[in-house]
Amino acid sequence: MSNKLVPVSRRELIRRLGDLGFRGPCTGSDHDFMVKGEIRITIPNTHQGKDIGVRLLAQILKESRTKRVEWLSAT
């Protein structure tokens, strides 16, 4: 298995974060979000079915305090 991040769909992001213990998605005023303890992660709205890019995914993982290896194992 490669340890390289790749773009993911919004649905896949939500599924994997759920596998990592996040609850949601919950409806916010502008964006949905997911929660794990005190950590709150904004889920981006993708338009026209586009995937979430690697840079944004890396930022989400950093904010969620999720290590790359944890993310890759949550497939």
Image (cartoon, rainbow, N blue to C red):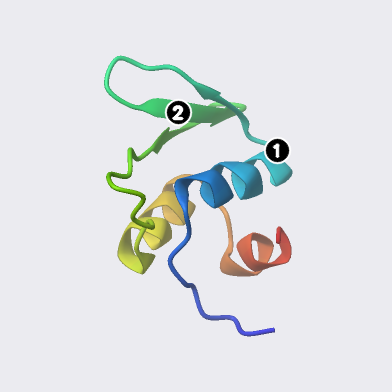
The image quadrant where one finds the N terminus is bottom right
Q: Residues within 10 Å of mark 1 (few under 14, many from 20)?
A: few
Q: Is residue 9 visible?
A: yes
Q: Is residue 30 above or below residue 57?
A: above
Rendered residue at 52%/80% (across/down): 4
Name the disc covering residue 33, or none.
2
Residue, disc 1 = 21
Helix, strand or loop at disc 1?
A: loop
Q: Which residue is at a point 43% across and 46% down the rendered structure image?
A: 63
Give residue 23's quadrant in the image: top right
Q: Residue at x 33, y 57 (%)?
A: 56
What is the tally of numbered marks visible in this picture? 2
Residue 21 is situated, as x and y percent measured from the top left of the image, at 70, 38
* Crowd rating for badge 2 (residues with CA inside 10 Å; few <14, some 14–19, many 20+): some
In which image quadrant can residue 67 be found?
bottom right
As drawn, is 54 to the left or to the right of 13?
Answer: left
Name the amino acid type tagged 1. Answer: Gly
Residue 17: where, in percent of width, then height? 61, 44
In the image, residue 20 lies at what x, y percent? Answer: 69, 46
Q: Is residue 65 visible?
A: no
Indicate whether 5 appears above or below 43: below
